[in-house]
């Protein structure tokens, strides 16, 4: 029987696995998809919020501020792209200026470091491309941008390296209560665990109800985005927010850690947890809203639209608690924004809850922290030559847009969590993330994966299982 | 009466060909259009290009018919190519299928492979 | 130190290198990022290439193969599987090209001149923001062409094609011959972007309907495309509600335009033309950087490779002249402006002293019946060329003799279309 079973390997599940891997307990993670970070974690604003939004006194406020501080160190240790560029909330009128005062006060109460209110002149000096009618801003230097999927992947990889068992393609189909814990069923296996952490994101409610009566309701809420080419990445140098309203934090404009410009999201209730469709109405709304902040964004330089689904629930706080009916079953649910920011703090909170429920967490003496990967396009000429001398595949550029080498792609296959799909490679090394969106490198990545895994390219999906790319060989008779 | 777009030049005249009147063409801006329209309805022909299996560094060898074949034979010709398997080296122009379906036209490789 | 480095070993780069050699350069290097020379022609296995240049109809691999064969014995050096990372012009005029490959690692190469011949890439779903599901099954036509023609794999069985550019049309026929069902070819504009003969031989031959003034408004499917929704568009090119048609299919191919691949040029600070997305060039294909030339689809997207060859030979000859005679000097430079109906011109600038006859290439912005191309000096017409038919899908060409250019009062001339 494993000590802790974590359901879901998005950023929350991965953060919990990483946290618990520091202790001498056995941990198993079950992920329904064929890769980690493949739900809300990969489709969001990629922002670590400073922490002035949540209401003071809520758990969300405390975990947000604690989380961003922890994230900085984790990203440094685990070689995760992270850039503390700071954020600005813009005011366009008197009413907005009042809102900024409210946010400022909340920020002070929440312990957000170094926040300040800026005059119109100050904010225009910092961001010359903002709309002329911006009349003030709240500046929070501790906000950062991050690669959310690499953040999740890095924590999961280090957890696995330190003994955590991760099973992908393992959707939980049934949970039984047994003596001293639980028996958890997936289509291919059965697991037994003393405690369960439910980190199933938008599906947390459904997982909860496999073992306990309904205690909360998750309302999927979709946000749509634009990702623009790197030539738009210099439009702004901070995360640019508008004043929040009842629909959330509003449409933001921000450089990404990869140098692109991200614009979004809107907020729309959807019926299905997996409804990541984009709509022309939603995208038009986002475009117009973003132009209020930064009128000069050239949307002709768009390279991708996507949508993510927030796991909203009825209260204004995260839902982090042991089930009232099923002891030992802990929900980490309703992790809407700022969930990415709070993730490592949520994990620490989960560990505290487990300890409170009787799990001993003795430190693991031989815990091996740290992780690095080769980023060829960031190497000096000398480093490039050293890599190529060691393995000539580092001299073969597969992704032209992002300058990703065959060496980097092949190396992902010997990491603790190797990719199973073309997009799995994309999330690990960036191949296909650029302006041609894999038009050139996609077939080559497919080929390399097939070669290295000893299968046919036909067997390599684009992303999740079922997202097939090829349906067979060209043979007119067979079709 | 059949309608066709003339492909003799980029202008793309919309031709009308009267099958019952000795394939008389109207709508053409030049005599070449009349010739094309009449021929296209009586015995349309096409060059077929495709690939065949290749055992070598590359997986497929591109091929073409070295002349036009009747349009009606295109799919049958594709099925013939399904069974062709080449092994490198291959030289451009090399005959891959002689006398394709009795047309007198050969299928030839359009690329060399060492 | 090289006399010429050509970046890109497709039809443009091959023609430029061979011409420069013919014009007397000895020390020429071609850098090609793929494993083999030939560029995109390798996957264009259909015929129709070479009618102008070779006076016969060749397939893409055959057309490329003829130039590759000519390299033999020329001493032109080729590094394949080699990616150029950047180009810088040193103060002494020497250009430094840094590149990487598996055999030699990271290298910096010095050269007197550079020919940019990187070609173009396809516009993607993102570039035109097609809404809908993020499922698999949406390919650019060229990516699908690579899978079929180079690797021998099918990308789907029931196909809708958005865009009637030539690659899309060619793929409609290719997939049909391989046993797929192509349900529709959908074009936003009221006219096709491809050549007429491709409409006939690729769509009409196989009874594939072409929907002009239509677009894709939704993509549905959980894991893989299951449906594509097509709607009519109004004169404003916006979908008309209530005109939706649903196609049950597993694949959507996009043939929605090509973009010159100029990241290297931009990074080298070459002045770009926002209309072509390529470099601004002079009569001899020289860019704003002295000694750096550009040719082929990296300058403007061509519809016939024969014209790429001709243009690239001019660039190669100019690079040779640059090495032998130094930079072209001219007391007077004429800039070509676009008037009514003209989308762009290449070249954009003409150095009068270097011009004997200037060939001007351009595209019109709409379909014209009887119309004339006029060269205007302000209000004054200097020349007019009658055309019975012009369309955006077909590149136009006029020749302006130096005598005519010298008649310009100022330093600009305008090319425009006047309907009869």
Image (cartoon, coloured by chain):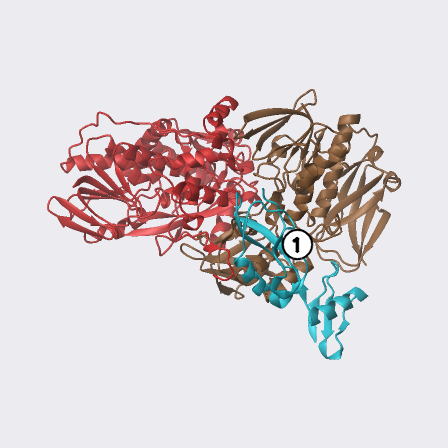
Chain colours: A red, B cyan, C brown
- Name the residue beneath numbered marker 1: C47
**Looking at the image, which is closer to me, A191 or C365?**
A191
Q: Which quarter of the figure has residue C336?
A: top right
**Looking at the image, which is closer to me, A124 or C325?**
C325
Task: Reply above or below: A298 against C417.
Answer: above
Give the side of residue C113 with respect to residue A143, left or right. right
**Looking at the image, which is closer to me, C364 or A98?**
C364
Q: Residue at x 36, y 35 (%)?
A: A414
Residue A294 coordinates in the image, percent (x, y): 53, 39
Q: Mark yes or no: residue A68 visible.
A: yes
Point out the image quarter for the N terminus of chain A: top left
Q: Mark 1 lies on which chain?
A: C
Helix, strand or loop for disc 1: strand
Residue C13 coordinates in the image, percent (x, y): 67, 38
How many residues crowd mark 1 within 10 Å: few (<14), some (14–19), many (20+)? some
Task: Reply above or below: B39 against A241.
Answer: below
Q: Residue furthest top?
A: C92
Task: Reply above or below: A467 against B79.
Answer: above
Give the side of residue A428 with respect to residue A329, left or right. right
Residue A91 coordinates in the image, percent (x, y): 47, 38
Give the side of residue C33 with respect to residue A186, left or right. right
Give the side of residue B89 with respect to residue A159, left or right. right
Q: Mark yes or no: residue A55 visible.
A: no
**Looking at the image, which is closer to me, A183 or A386?**
A386
């Amino acid at each position: 029987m494993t000590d802790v079973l974590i359901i879901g390997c998005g950023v929350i599940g991965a953060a919990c696995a990483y946290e618990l891997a520091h202790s001498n307990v056995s941990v198993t993670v079950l992920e329904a998809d064929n890769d980690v970070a493949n739900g809300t974690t990969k489709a969001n604003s990629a922002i670590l919020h400073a922490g002035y939004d949540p209401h003071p006194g809520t758990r969300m406020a405390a975990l947000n501020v604690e989380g961003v501080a922890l994230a900085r160190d984790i990203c440094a240790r685990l070689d995760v792209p992270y850039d503390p560029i700071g954020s600005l909330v813009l005011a366009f009128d008197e009413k907005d200026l009042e809102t900024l005062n409210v946010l400022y006060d909340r920020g002070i109460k929440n312990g957000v470091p170094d926040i300040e209110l800026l005059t119109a002149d100050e904010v225009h000096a910092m961001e010359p491309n903002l709309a002329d009618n911006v009349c003030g801003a709240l500046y929070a230097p501790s906000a950062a941008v991050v690669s959310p999927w690499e953040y999740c992947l890095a924590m999961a990889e280090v957890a696995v390296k330190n003994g955590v068992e991760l099973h992908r393609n393992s959707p939980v189909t049934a949970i039984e209560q047994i003596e001293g814990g639980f028996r958890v069923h997936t289509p291919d296996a059965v697991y037994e665990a003393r405690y369960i952490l439910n980190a199933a994101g938008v599906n947390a409610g459904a997982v909860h109800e496999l073992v306990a009566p309904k205690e909360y309701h998750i309302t999927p809420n979709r946000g749509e985005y634009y990702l623009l080419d790197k030539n738009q990445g210099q439009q702004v140098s901070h995360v640019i927010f508008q004043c929040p309203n009842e629909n959330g934090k509003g449409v933001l404009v921000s450089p990404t850690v990869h140098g692109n410009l991200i614009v979004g999201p809107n907020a729309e209730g959807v019926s299905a947890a997996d409804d990541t469709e984009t709509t022309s109405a939603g995208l038009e709304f986002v475009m117009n809203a973003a132009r209020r902040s930064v009128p000069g964004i050239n949307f002709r330089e768009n390279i991708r639209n996507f949508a993510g689904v927030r796991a909203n629930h009825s209260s204004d706080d995260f839902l982090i608690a042991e089930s009232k009916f099923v002891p030992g079953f802990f929900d980490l649910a309703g992790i809407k924004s700022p969930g990415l920011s709070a993730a490592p703090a949520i994990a620490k909170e989960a560990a505290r809850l487990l300890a409170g429920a009787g799990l001993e967490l003795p430190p693991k003496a031989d815990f091996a922290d740290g992780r690095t990967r080769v980023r060829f396009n960031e190497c000096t000429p000398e480093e490039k030559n050293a890599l190529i001398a060691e393995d000539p595949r580092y001299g073969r550029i597969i992704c032209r847009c992002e300058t990703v080498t065959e060496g980097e792609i092949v190396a992902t296959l010997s990491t603790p969590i190797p990719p199973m799909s073309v997009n799995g490679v994309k999330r690990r090394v960036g191949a296909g993330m650029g302006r041609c969106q894999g038009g050139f490198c996609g077939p080559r990545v497919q080929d390399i994966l097939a070669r290295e895994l000893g299968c046919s390219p036909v067997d390599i999906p684009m992303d999740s299982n079922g997202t097939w790319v090829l349906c067979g060989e060209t043979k007119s008779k067979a079709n | 009466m059949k309608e066709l777009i003339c492909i003799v030049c980029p202008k793309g005249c919309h031709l009308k060909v009267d099958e019952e009147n000795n394939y008389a063409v109207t709508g053409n801006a030049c005599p070449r259009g009349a010739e094309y329209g009449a021929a296209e309805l009586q015995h349309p022909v096409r060059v077929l290009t495709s690939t065949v299996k290749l055992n070598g560094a590359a997986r497929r060898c591109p091929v073409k018919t070295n002349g036009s074949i009747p349009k009606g034979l295109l799919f049958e010709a594709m099925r013939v190519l399904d069974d062709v398997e080449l092994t490198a080296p291959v030289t451009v122009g090399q005959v891959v299928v002689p006398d394709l379906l009795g047309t007198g036209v050969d299928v030839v490789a359009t690329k060399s492979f060492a | 130190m090289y006399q010429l480095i050509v970046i890109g070993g497709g039809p443009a780069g091959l023609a430029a290198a061979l011409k420069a050699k013919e014009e007397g350069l000895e020390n020429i290097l071609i850098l090609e990022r793929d494993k083999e020379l030939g560029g995109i022609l390798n996957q264009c296995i259909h015929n129709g290439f070479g009618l102008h240049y070779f006076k016969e109809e060749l397939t893409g691999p055959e057309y490329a193969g003829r130039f590759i064969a000519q390299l033999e014995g020329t001493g032109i050096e080729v590094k394949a599987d080699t990616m150029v990372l950047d180009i810088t012009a040193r103060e002494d005029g020497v250009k430094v090209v840094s590149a990487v490959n598996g055999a030699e690692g990271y290298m910096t190469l010095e050269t007197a001149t550079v020919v940019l011949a990187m070609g173009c890439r396809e516009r993607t779903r993102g570039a035109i923001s097609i809404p809908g599901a993020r499922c698999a099954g949406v390919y650019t036509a060229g990516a699908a062409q690579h899978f079929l023609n180079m690797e021998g794999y099918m990308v789907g069985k029931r196909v809708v094609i958005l865009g009637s550019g030539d690659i899309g049309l060619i793929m409609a026929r290719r997939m049909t011959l391989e046993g797929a069902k192509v349900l529709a070819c959908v074009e936003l504009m009221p006219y096709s972007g491809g050549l007429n003969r491709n409409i006939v031989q690729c769509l009409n031959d196989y009874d594939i309907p072409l929907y002009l003034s239509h677009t894709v408004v939704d993509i549905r499917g959980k894991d893989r495309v299951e449906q594509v929704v097509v709607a009519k568009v109004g004169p404003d090119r916006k979908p008309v509600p209530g005109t939706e048609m649903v196609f049950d299919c597993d694949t959507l191919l996009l043939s929605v335009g090509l973009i010159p691949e100029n990241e290297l040029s931009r990074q080298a600070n070459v002045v770009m033309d926002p209309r072509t997305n390529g470099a601004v060039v002079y009569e001899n294909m020289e860019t704003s950087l002295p000694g750096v030339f550009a040719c082929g689809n990296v300058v403007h997207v061509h519809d016939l490779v024969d014209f790429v060859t001709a243009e690239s030979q001019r660039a190669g000859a100019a690079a040779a002249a640059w090495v032998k005679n130094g930079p072209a000097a001219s007391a007077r430079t004429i800039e070509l402006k676009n008037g009514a109906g003209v989308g762009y011109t290449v070249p954009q600038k003409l150095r009068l002293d270097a011009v004997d006859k200037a060939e001007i290439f351009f595209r019109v912005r709409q379909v014209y019946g009887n119309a004339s191309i006029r060269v205007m000096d302000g209000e004054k017409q200097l020349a007019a060329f009658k055309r019975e038919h012009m369309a955006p899908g077909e590149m136009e060409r006029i020749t302006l003799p130096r005598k005519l250019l010298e008649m310009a009062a100022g330093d600009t001339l305008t090319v425009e279309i006047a309907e009869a």
